[in-house]
Every structure is written in structure tokens, then in C-alpha cells.
Amino acid sequence: MPILPPSDVIVRVRTALESAPNAMFLQLSRSLGVPEEQVVRSLPEGWARELDIGRWEELLRRLADLGEVHVIVSNGAATLESVGTFGGFSTWGEFFNVQSATLDMHIRWPNLGAVFTLVKPSHMTGKKTFSVQFFDKEGHAAFKVFLNIGASEPGEETRRAFAGLQAEFGCDGS
């Protein structure tokens, strides 16, 4: 069972978003001194939906159906952004591999702790972005998969694919 953020964190996140709705969650989590997952769990209704992390492999395999996506991986010293398609899946020990012509990822699946779908304003344009965001067991972002990056509003096909992921993998069963 996930640990919900303390009520003061929820208030601080929502207050920050009132004045800057397109804030980057990575920066917001650092400024508040909490893991990014706690920021996501504090979002206003309708922004985030938790998916079943126990079905991580099925979910990753379904990402191949989305076509070209924008993947972001960040740590304390660097951020890497890559555009490509999921595919070429294999498992080797603690690694679940994504090795398509355009993406080469090696995911340490035992460290995955939570996954959410998010709808939020782009920090660059303010237009809605649709993403699937994975977090490690400490609540830090593992990687983020954007169906659209915010250059334009998501199309109907993107919206349907996103809703399908939520329906299929949502924790609340709806």
C-alpha cells in the first residue's frame, strides 16, 4: 500500500501549482524536499492516476502499441531525452530490455515502485501533455514516457490510447 503524502505536502504542492500550473515536478519536488512521487500523489483530482505496478512488464510491452514516444530519464547530474518506439523486449537477470531501432533501455525492474498516468500542462508551452511515469521504490522518477511533449494538444488517437492504458492498468479498476 502506498504511503500518502502528509497533508502539509499536499497543500504545499497544490499551492505551488495554483501559481505555476506548468511547473516541472522534478524541480517542485526538490524545492519542497520530497520525492517526486509524493508530488504526483498530491496533485489535484484528474491530473494523475495510479496504475498497477505489479503489471509493469505488460504495461511496458503495451507501450510498443503507442508508436513514437518521448522518453525522459533524469538523475542528479543529467537528463537524457530520446524519441523512439518501444520494442525488442528481453529479460536478462535484473534487466528488462527495450532494444528497438530507436530506443535502447535497460530497466532494473526490481527497483520499480509505482507508475502513474499524468495529464498536465507542458512546462514549455502550457499545452496538455499525456505521460506514463515510472518511479523507483524511493519515490524518485525512474523514467517518463510522453505520448505528446506539449508542442500541440494531443489528438484523438493519443487520447484514446491513453484512456485505454488507464482502463487496462488502473489500480481502481475503472
Image: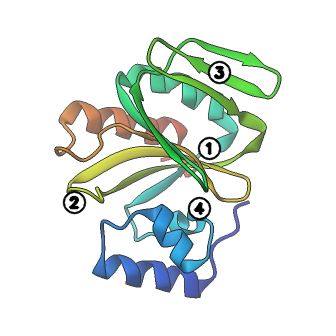
1 or 3: tag closer to the N-terminus = 1
Q: Position of residue 162 (x, y in %)?
A: 36, 38
The secondary element bearing badge 1 is classed as: loop
Structural crowding at the residue carrying mark 2, measured as other residues with C-alpha within 10 Å and reported as few (<14), some (14–19) or many (≥20)? some
Identify the residue position indicated by label 3 in the image.
97
The secondary element bearing badge 2 is classed as: loop
**Is residue 42 in view?**
no
Q: Position of residue 160 (x, y in %)?
A: 29, 34
Instruction: Name the mark on residue 126.
Output: 2
- The answer to whether mark 4 and mark 1 are in CB contact below 8 A is no
Question: Gap between marks 4 and 2, in whole Å?
Answer: 21 Å
The structure residue drawn at horizontal position 38% and vertical position 25%, both measured from the top left corner, is 66
The secondary element bearing badge 3 is classed as: strand
- Numbered disc in front, either 1 or 2: 2
Structural crowding at the residue carrying mark 1, measured as other residues with C-alpha within 10 Å and reported as few (<14), some (14–19) or many (≥20)? some
Identify which amino acid the numbered label 1 is placed on: Asp
Describe residue 38's horizontal placement relative to residue 84 as left or right: right
Question: Gap between marks 4 and 1, in whole Å?
Answer: 15 Å
Please tell me which residue lies in front, 147 or 27: 27
Question: Gap between marks 1 and 2, in whole Å?
Answer: 28 Å
3 or 4: tag closer to the N-terminus = 4
74 in relation to 108, above or below:
below
Identify the residue position indicated by label 4 in the image.
37
Question: Gap between marks 2 and 3, in whole Å?
Answer: 33 Å
Question: Gap between marks 1 and 3, in whole Å?
Answer: 20 Å
Q: Position of residue 60 (x, y in %)?
A: 56, 28
Identify the residue position indicated by label 1 in the image.
52
Identify which amino acid the numbered label 3 is placed on: Asn
The structure residue drawn at horizontal position 41% and vertical position 52%, both measured from the top left corner, is 118
- The answer to whether mark 3 and mark 4 are in CB contact below 8 A is no
